[in-house]
Each structure stands twice: as structure tokens, then as C-alpha cells.
């Protein structure tokens, strides 16, 4: 069957137009995902601030600097996972148990609270750091620092 003259050109133009539409939709989904993650990052920061104020009220001892990096790599990979659409990995790496706040806390409880404050701060910082990266940098760091680490299989690598 022979197509009328100019049909091929029309089909090629429509095909490229549809690619543009799909590309725009993918970009919109990426922008929406980034906007959603900005809110999540703000929530991490807010939780950290609220918990920090609560710890101050209870005269919680400072956890020290030994724990500054504790959980930071998992939090960073979790942040990248969300931005790359890997929600299951994000939840696994960034979910923290709700801190236990009691009217009267023993010294051991206060030490745990101090560490929990640090963990929320770490989540907030990791999220902000991931958001500051370009899409390309996110993908590269995901493949270099996260894949084959933290129980993230090689099949999770991105192209």
C-alpha cells in the first residue's frame, strides 16, 4: 500500500512531537517529584528542630561529634533513591522509629534522645544535599556510592 505524498513527513513530525510530549511529561513528573521531596526535606528539618527543642527542654546531654556521620550514607542514598523513583529503597533507608518522649526520662533515655536528634538532622542534611545535585550527579553518585551498598542490588543501577 502506498501512502499519499507527504504522509511520511507528517508521521515523522507527529512521532517527534509525541516524543516531545512524553519528554515534557517525564520532566513534569521529575519536577513534581523534586517538589515533593523538597517538602519531605522540610519535614525532616522540622522534625529535627522540634526534637532538638524538646531535647533542650529536658537538658539532654550533647551526643558529641562521634555520631556526626552515623547513618549519613544511608540517609543520602535514601534521598537519592526517592529522587530516582525508588520509593521502596527510600522508605527502607530513611524511616526512623518515632522517638519516645516521656514526662520523666532517665539519663540513658536522654542519651538515646540525643542520638535521635542527630539522626533527624542527618536525614535533613542528606535530603538537602541530594536536592542540590543535578540529575546527572544524582545518577552518578547513586551508582558509585549506593548500588552494591546498604542491600541495594546491582539491578538498581541507573543509566
Image (cartoon, rainbow, N blue to C red):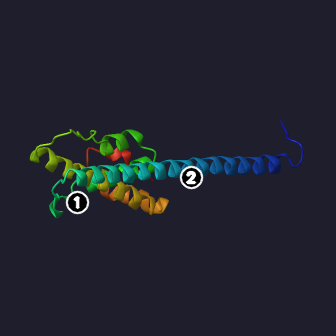
What's the mark number on residue 20? none
**Left or right position of 67 against 88:** left
Q: Are marks 1 and 2 in contact (CB under 8 Å)?
A: no
Taking the image as drawn, is residue 104 in sight? yes
Q: Percent x, y for residue 67?
A: 18, 58
| Count of number-bearing discs | 2
Q: Quadrant of residue 1?
A: top right
Q: Nearer the viewer, residue 46 or 84?
A: 46
Q: Secondary structure at mark 2?
A: helix
Residue sticking out furthest to the top: 1
Write the residue at 41% across / 48% down. Answer: 43
Q: Position of residue 49 (x, y in %)?
A: 34, 54
Residue at x 23%, y 49% (from the top left corner): 116
- Whether residue 153 is visible to the viewer of this picture, yes or no, is no
Viewer-closest of 22 and 121 = 121
**Residue 91, percent across and down?**
35, 40
Secondary structure under badge 1?
loop
Q: x%, y% of residue 71?
A: 24, 53
- The answer to which of marks 1 and 2 sits earlier in the sequence is 2
Of labels 1 and 2, the one closer to you = 1
Label 2 Cα crowd, 10 Å radius (few <14 / some 14-19 / many 20+): few
The residue labelled by disc 1 is 69
Estimate the spatial distance between the alpha carbons at disc 1 and disc 2, rounded to whole Å. Answer: 29 Å
Q: Nearer the viewer, residue 152 or 54?
A: 54
Q: Which mark is residue 31?
A: 2
Identify the residue at horizontal 33%, vertical 59% (top origin): 144
Residue 94 vs residue 103: left or right?
Answer: right
Q: Which residue corresponds to the image point at 39% horizontal and 48% vertical from the top-left? A: 81
Given the current orientation, which residue lies at the most extreme right position?
Answer: 5
The answer to whether residue 37 is left or right of residue 147 is right
Query: Up-down: is 132 above or below 81?
Result: below
Query: Dot 1: within a 10 Å radius of its alpha carbon, few (fewer than 14), some, or many (20 or more) residues?
Result: few
Amino acid at each position: 500500500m502506498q501512502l499519499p505524498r507527504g504522509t511520511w513527513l507528517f508521521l515523522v513530525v507527529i512521532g517527534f512531537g509525541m516524543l516531545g510530549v512524553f519528554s515534557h511529561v517525564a520532566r513534569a513528573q521529575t519536577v513534581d517529584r523534586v517538589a515533593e521531596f523538597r517538602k519531605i526535606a522540610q519535614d525532616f528539618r522540622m522534625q529535627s528542630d522540634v526534637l532538638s527543642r524538646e531535647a533542650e527542654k529536658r537538658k539532654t546531654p550533647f551526643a558529641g561529634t562521634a555520631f556526626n556521620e552515623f547513618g549519613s550514607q544511608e540517609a543520602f542514598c535514601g534521598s537519592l533513591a526517592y529522587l530516582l523513583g525508588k520509593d521502596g529503597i527510600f522508605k527502607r533507608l530513611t524511616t526512623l522509629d518515632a522517638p519516645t518522649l516521656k514526662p520523666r526520662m532517665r539519663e540513658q533515655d536522654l542519651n538515646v534522645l540525643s542520638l535521635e536528634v542527630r539522626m533527624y538532622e542527618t536525614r535533613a542534611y542528606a535530603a538537602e544535599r541530594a536536592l542540590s545535585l543535578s540529575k546527572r550527579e544524582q545518577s552518578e553518585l547513586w551508582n558509585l556510592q549506593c548500588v552494591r551498598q546498604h542491600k541495594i542490588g546491582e539491578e538498581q543501577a541507573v543509566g
